[in-house]
Image (cartoon, rainbow, N blue to C red):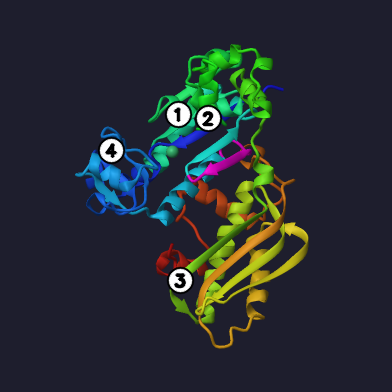
Amino acid sequence: MAKTFLHLDMDAFFAAVEQLDFPKFRGKPVIVGADPKEGRGRGVVSTCSYEARVYGVHSAMPISRAYKLCPHGIYVYPRGRRYKQVSDQIMELLSGFSADIEQISIDEAFLDITSTIKFFGSSVELGKTLKQKIVQETRLTASVGIAPVKFVAKIASDLQKPDGLVVVSEGSVKAFLAPLDLSRLWGVGPKTLPELHKLGLKTIGDLARYPQHKLKMGKVGLHLWNLANGIDHRSVEYETRAKSISKEVTFDSDKKNPEELKNILLYLCNELSREMRRKGYKGRTIHLKIRLQDFSTFTRSRTLEVGTNKTDVIFQNILDLFTNFDPAGSSFRLLGVGLSQLDIKCRQLDLFDGLPENKSKIDDVLDRVREKFGENAITRASLLYAKHDSQWIRD
Ligand SMILES: [Mg+2]
């Protein structure tokens, strides 16, 4: 059966988050990356705002070069934890549009929307709704590409940035690809591009029309020729991606109080189980990670008879492991919890399929209220402390 893929890519993500959080940065060239030190800094540009791109600044450019091109720009260090927070919010939102999600970077994901288009009327409507939802919930814009072939969706999302929506219909894939530069093909890099240029090929269409047997580039040549002709059987690879899921925090100052540490563990278990449920996973092996003040690191684990994604079950086991650990008077620097031996059979689109059997009632209610009213709407009483005192989390 023909598939439909959606590729989502946030626009100038890190810089956009900075402009969102600091209104004085809006409309200005914002460059996220290393310290420019008046053009003598080391390191590179991570992301820059569209206002900075006007000056020729782009990501991966040496920061010293960026400074020469745009000395009046606003230079900021990346705030990884904040970007991850926004990213999690976006990825969670995507699960309302497909159960098959492959996150490929902090601000990019593929969705297989084959079976969910019907809930939105058309792929265009699905794309529009998704973009609107992201703007409503994060006040950030995204670019979306939709196509019957995975890599074509990725190319499409890049064509009308920022705030783009490009839909390539079945049957028009080759025509869509033909005029584009060869460098846009996945796998065409600094080595292969000159080889193709030598053959007089400039566009994807040139390669598509070139007799395949004359390419003489081995497997790579065949692969690229297939892509140029819109042939690519890759699908959304959520199943092989996650081998384990974990959550951890490093504390600002080392901690000793057992009650406080247990509270933090509950918070982590809650975050972990929510992600497991959202992604439709159950895990059999529960892991506890501990780092003490002297950086010595310990892991403890336990394997259950059957997989779980329930907060209470995970927490009870973590608590056992934690209680049996003897820190010998040391303070804690880091705590982490994780699940492995993941089973994905329980994956399903709960938004459309009703109550999944793998959820406990209380977890389900909590998840739903949060979906509807936002992250902070409801929380278990003992989590209140952790939620509002984020001092102990650092990047
Ligand atoms: Mg992006």
User: Which mark, residue 52?
Assistant: 4
Identity of the amino acid at label 1? Asp
Residue extending furthest toward the left: 72
Residue matched to label 1: 158
Choose mark 3 or mark 2, whichever is in front: 2
Circle 2 is placed at which residue position? 154
Disc 1 to disc 3, C-alpha distance: 39 Å
* Lateral position of residue 181 relative to residue 262, left or right: left
Q: Relative to 140, is 153 above or below? A: above
First along the sequence among labels 4 and 1: 4
| Disc 1 to disc 2: CB gap under 8 Å | yes
Query: Mark 2 is on which residue type?
Result: Lys
SS category of the residue bearing label 3 = strand
Name the image quarter holding the C terminus.
bottom left
Magenta range is 96-106
Observer-nearest of 188 and 359: 188
> Could you say whether the residue bearing mark 1 is in a helix, strand or loop?
helix
The yes-or-no answer for disc 3 within 8 Å of ligand 1 is: no
N-terminal of the pair, mark 3 or mark 2, is 2
Residue 322 x %, y %: 63, 76
User: Do tag 3 and tag 4 residues touch (Cβ < 8 Å)?
Assistant: no
Depth check, mark 1 against mark 3: the one in front is 1
Image location of residue 182, percent across then percent down: 51, 22
Question: Residue 251's mark?
Answer: 3
Instruction: Work out how far the residue at label 4 is from the one at label 1, CA to CA, in angstroms.
Output: 18 Å
Q: Which image quadrant shows ligand 1?
A: top left
Q: Is mark 2 within 8 Å of ligand 1?
A: no
Q: Nearer the viewer, residue 264 or 147?
A: 147
